[in-house]
Image (spheres, grey):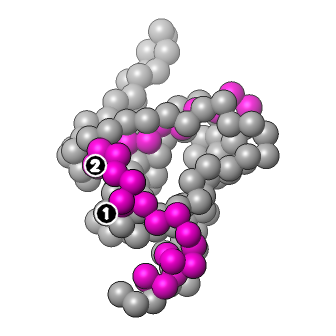
């Protein structure tokens, strides 16, 4: 998979509440190597504003909501709104991502295909665009 895609995870509903689950390599297109959370984002702040060379990620709004802007560096930009804990947004490597407008009390869970590697990050937008142009 080389384009962003929305996934709907299984839901088990009963009178006690809902349960959703995600199995790497089954519900998402990679084995999960790392999980991290973004939470307590102050009003008006954003997260992300970078790209990855190889890392694949799935973003899930565990609680609350937020927007994600994706830019492929070639002229295609997309905005996604996440607000449901059984929906995930798959983002492959090579996309600039910005997360913003977090609702109060929101939490974002990120499933990652690789362990943390600072060398995989592209943190400067002009460098990102130049890399895409030269590819």
Secondary element at tag 1: loop
Report the residue that reaches farthest toward the front: 119
x, y percent for residue 45: 73, 46
One can see residue 62 in this view? yes
The disc label shown at residue 54, or none: 1
Can you say whether 106 is above or below 80 in the image?
A: above
> Are dots 2 and 1 in contact, CB under 8 Å?
yes
Q: Is residue 97 left or right of residue 52?
A: right
- Check the picture and name the quadrant holding the C terminus: bottom left
Q: Is residue 53 left or right of residue 100?
A: left
Report the residue that reaches farthest toward the top: 16
Instruction: Residue 131: say if magenta.
Output: yes
In depth, the one of 36 and 80 nearer the eye is 36
* Residue visible at 57% across and 79% down in the picture: 126
Can you say whether 46 is above or below 123 in the image?
A: above
One can see residue 92 in this view? no
Can you say whether 23 is above or below 133 in the image?
A: above
| Residue annotated with mark 2 | 114
x, y percent for residue 8: 41, 44
- C-alpha gap between disc 2 and disc 1: 9 Å
x, y percent for residue 42: 74, 36
| Mark 2 or 1, nearer chain start | 1
Numbered range of the magenta stretch: 104-132
* Residue visible at 49% across and 15% down in the picture: 17
Instruction: Residue 120: say if magenta.
Output: yes
**Quadrant in the rendering for residue 124:** bottom right
Q: Is residue 19 left or right of residue 29?
A: right
In depth, the one of 73 and 21 nearer the eye is 73
x, y percent for residue 52: 41, 62
* Residue visible at 48% across and 41% down in the picture: 60
């Amino acid at each position: 998979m080389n384009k962003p895609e929305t996934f709907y995870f299984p839901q088990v509903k009963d009178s006690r509440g809902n349960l959703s689950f995600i199995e790497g390599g089954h519900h998402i297109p990679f084995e999960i190597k790392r999980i991290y959370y973004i939470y307590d984002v102050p009003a008006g702040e954003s997260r992300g504003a970078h790209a990855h060379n190889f890392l694949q990620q799935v973003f899930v709004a565990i609680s609350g909501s937020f927007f994600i802007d994706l830019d492929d560096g070639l002229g295609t930009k997309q905005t996604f709104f996440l607000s449901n804990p059984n929906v995930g947004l798959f983002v492959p490597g090579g996309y600039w991502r910005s997360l913003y407008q977090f609702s109060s009390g929101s939490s974002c869970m990120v499933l990652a295909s690789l362990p943390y590697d600072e060398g995989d990050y592209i943190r400067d937008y002009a460098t990102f665009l130049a890399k895409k142009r030269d590819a």
